[in-house]
Image (cartoon, grey):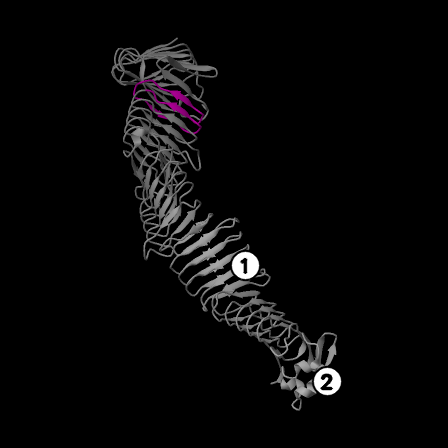
């Protein structure tokens, strides 16, 4: 056994291979190298005692003053059992683990459990008030007491419990969990994050400084006026009670304001280019500069306000008031009866469930409506706006466009402006009202009324009905788009792929078909109806109508009134109905079903009969076939006349033109 005694200055004390006793002498900065064996060190009032780990079970004693123990593994990588007794005064223990061999470092310095242990070695201490610890690359667990301590960990997933003092705690690399505890602590997650790990940092009571540094960190300020800095990565910052300053740094950060003490007192700091950030608030909140998102939490009725950026603001289940301000904002009301104002910019506003009031402000805004009690407001010259509705909806003034969603049969109504209205997959009733509107029915059997103005209507798929009240209205259809009907109070000509036309009212109107097989119905007035090509069915209705079947095999019914019926080219059937009717034969195999002698007249084109033909010569070539008369024109056609019993009845009723 060697006994080595230092001086009052700064000494280097070296033991041997036995159980040695080394005395510092006091007054200086002493270094203790015990060597092999179970050694005992006496600092005796040294200003600082550097104790280097050596093999064996060693014990270090402080003196009556303030002792600073510095314990290091740089001398020997083998960590054996060490014991430190601080003695009187405020003593500190500084532990530095330089080597990577010490993977897991465990230390419990709380007042009720002082001690450290790892596998076959143990480190115990008493009378130590302050710890300064720098660990190696293991997964460390460190619990501190109520003094102001310092802990720096290296690699590994570390847990640090700060205790009640003003601690400085740094996690470095790895997925670290750090609790500051009471006191004004400084907490730094250091290199955790995208490349190294994600840290959880808790300030506890006191005014704490917490820095997440690299990585996707979670920071809690808890009580006190804390300063939280997320650093790199996608961080989550909880201010807790007190007036806190929260700065997420770079990355897409989330700020959580959930405590009553956070209501309007926390300061959030973001910079340009700092990512897309979100505030989750249980209280009224206005977004600061460079924060893009706001989510209202809880169930209270809250107010949420954006900024000049393109904000995403979401309400909660309460009755919220949401202001987007400038920027192209996306606003969600959530449940409840919400009031949403987009402000400037091209905003998208969804009131959510409940009876909501939505105002887009300036810009080209989009509204999502899901309740017939929702109200959409706009101002004059406030942009070109669109309502997308899953329920029946009528546009209010200064809202231009409407699109119905889903597959349910809904009603969509325009206003006095030039609207664009789009139906859904259901059977819709669409009305443009005044203005020059564009209306698209979509799928389903739709009823489309352009209203006043020059309207463009397209029913899409399905058997659609169009109401036309202006000769400038245009009806479009696609091939194989169903069997469609135009009901018109003005003269109208069917466009391609629209099959049927019904004239309304009592005014004398013109109705014209197309190349398809049309059904055309006149009204109570004196109509001019023309089927054009196709095998048409034309009904004159009341009034003195002029009906021309055009090309194709047509059926013409004059109805009441003095009508003129011209089958045109093709094999036609002509029925005059009541009144004094004129039947015009232009070739083909035509049949007159209800000729009345001395009332109706038949006009035959001279080019069919021949220039030398007379009525008498025509009748000479005619014959009776039972109760009908047949006039045969050879290759030019044949006219069959029902309603007479003798050819002589035609002497005064047959006219060559």
How far across and down, in percent of the image, does residue 106 sit?
42, 19
Q: Report, in whole angstroms, how far the alpha carbon at label 1 lies from the one at label 2.
A: 50 Å
Query: Where is residue 177, by image quadrant?
Result: top left
Tell whether position 142 is magenta: yes
Residue 145 location, quadrant: top left
Location of residue 649 in the rendering, given as x and y in whole percent from the top left corner: 67, 80
* Tally of numbered tags: 2
Between 413 and 548, which is closer to the camera in this rendering? 548
- Report the front residue among 359 and 144: 359
Note whether residue 441 is visible: no
| Disc assigned to residue 38 | none
Q: Nearer the viewer, residue 118 or 518?
A: 518
- Side (left or right) of 246 relative to 76: left
Please, what is the dominant secondary structure of the magenta stretch? loop
Q: Looking at the image, can residue 160 be seen?
A: yes
Helix, strand or loop at mark 1:
loop
Which residue carries the number 2 mark?
621
Measured as percent of width and height from the top left, residue 361 is found at 33, 51
**Residue position marked by numbered label 1 in the rendering:** 464
Marks 1/2 in contact by CB < 8 Å: the verdict is: no
Residue at image position (44%, 28%) is 157
Extreme residue toward the bottom, this view: 612
**Dot 1: within a 10 Å radius of its alpha carbon, few (fewer than 14), some, or many (20 or more) residues?**
many
Which residues lie in the magenta part?
A: 136-163
- Closest to the camera, between mark 1 and mark 2, is 2
């Amino acid at each position: 056994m060697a006994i080595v005694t230092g001086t009052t200055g700064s000494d280097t004390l070296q033991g041997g291979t036995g159980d040695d006793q080394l005395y510092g002498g006091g007054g200086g900065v002493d270094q203790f190298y015990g060597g092999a064996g179970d050694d005992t060190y006496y600092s005796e009032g040294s200003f600082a005692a550097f104790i280097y780990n050596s093999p064996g079970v060693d014990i270090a004693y402080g003196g009556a003053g303030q002792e600073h123990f510095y314990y290091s593994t740089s001398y020997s990588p083998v960590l054996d059992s060490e014991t430190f007794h601080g003695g009187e005064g405020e003593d500190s223990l500084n532990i530095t683990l330089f080597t990577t061999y010490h993977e897991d470092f465990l230390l419990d310095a709380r007042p009720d459990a002082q001690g450290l242990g790892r596998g076959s070695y143990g480190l115990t201490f008493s009378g130590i008030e302050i710890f300064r610890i720098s660990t190696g690359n293991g997964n460390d667990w460190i619990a501190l007491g109520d003094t102001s301590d310092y802990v720096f960990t290296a690699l590994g997933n570390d847990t640090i419990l700060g205790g009640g003092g003003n601690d400085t705690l740094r996690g470095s690399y790895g997925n670290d969990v750090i609790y500051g505890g009471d006191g004004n602590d400084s907490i730094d997650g250091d290199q955790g994050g995208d490349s190294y790990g994600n840290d959880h940092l808790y300030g506890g009571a006191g005014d704490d400084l917490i820095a997440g540094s690299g990585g996707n960190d979670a920071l809690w300020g808890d009580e006190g006026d804390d300063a939280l800095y997320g650093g790199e990565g996608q961080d989550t910052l909880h201010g807790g009670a007190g007036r806190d300053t929260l700065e997420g740094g770079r990355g897409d950060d989330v700020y959580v304001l959930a405590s009553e003490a956070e209501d309007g007192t926390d300061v959030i700091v973001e910079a340009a280019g700092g990512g897309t950030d979100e505030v989750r608030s249980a209280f009224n909140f206005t977004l600061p500069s460079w924060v893009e998102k706001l989510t209202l939490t809880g169930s209270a009725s809250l107010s949420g306000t954006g900024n000049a950026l393109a904000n995403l603001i979401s309400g909660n289940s309460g009755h919220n008031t949401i202001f987007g301000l400038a920027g192209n904002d996306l606003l969600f009301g959530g449940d409840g009866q919400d009031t949403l104002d987009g402000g400037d910019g091209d905003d998208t506003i969804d009131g959510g469930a409940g009876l909501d009031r939505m105002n887009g402000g300036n810009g080209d805004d989009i509204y999502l409506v899901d309740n017939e009690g929702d109200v959409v407001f706009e101002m004059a010259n406030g942009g070109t706006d669109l309502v997308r509705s899953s329920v029946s909806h009528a546009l209010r003034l200064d809202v231009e466009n409407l699109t119905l969603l889903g597959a349910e049969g809904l009603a969509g109504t325009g206003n006095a402006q030039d609207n664009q209205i789009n139906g859904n997959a259901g059977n819709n009733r669409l009305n443009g009202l005044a203005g020059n509107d564009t209306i698209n029915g979509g799928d389903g059997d739709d009823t489309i009324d352009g209203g006043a103005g020059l309207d463009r209507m397209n029913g899409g798929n399905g058997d659609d009905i169009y109401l036309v009240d202006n000769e400038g209205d245009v009806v479009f259809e696609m091939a194989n788009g169903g069997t469609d009907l135009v009901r018109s109070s003005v003269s109208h000509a069917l466009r391609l792929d629209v099959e049927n036309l019904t004239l309304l009212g009592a005014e004398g109107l013109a109705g014209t078909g197309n190349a398809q097989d049309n059904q055309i119905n006149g009204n109570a007035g004196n109509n001019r109806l023309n089927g054009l090509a196709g095998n048409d069915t034309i009904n004159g209705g009341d009034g003195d109508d002029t009906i021309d079947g055009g090309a194709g095999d047509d059926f013409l019914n004059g109805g009441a009134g003095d009508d003129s019926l011209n089958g045109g080219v093709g094999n036609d059937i002509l029925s005059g109905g009541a009144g004094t009717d004129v039947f015009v034969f232009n070739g083909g195999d035509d049949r007159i079903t209800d000729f009345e002698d001395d009332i109706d007249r038949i006009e035959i084109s001279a080019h069919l009969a021949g220039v030398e033909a007379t009525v008498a010569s025509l009748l000479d070539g005619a014959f009776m076939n039972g109760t009908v008369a047949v006039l045969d024109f050879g290759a030019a056609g044949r006219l069959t006349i029902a309603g007479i019993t003798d050819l002589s009845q035609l002497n005064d009723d047959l006219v060559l033109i």
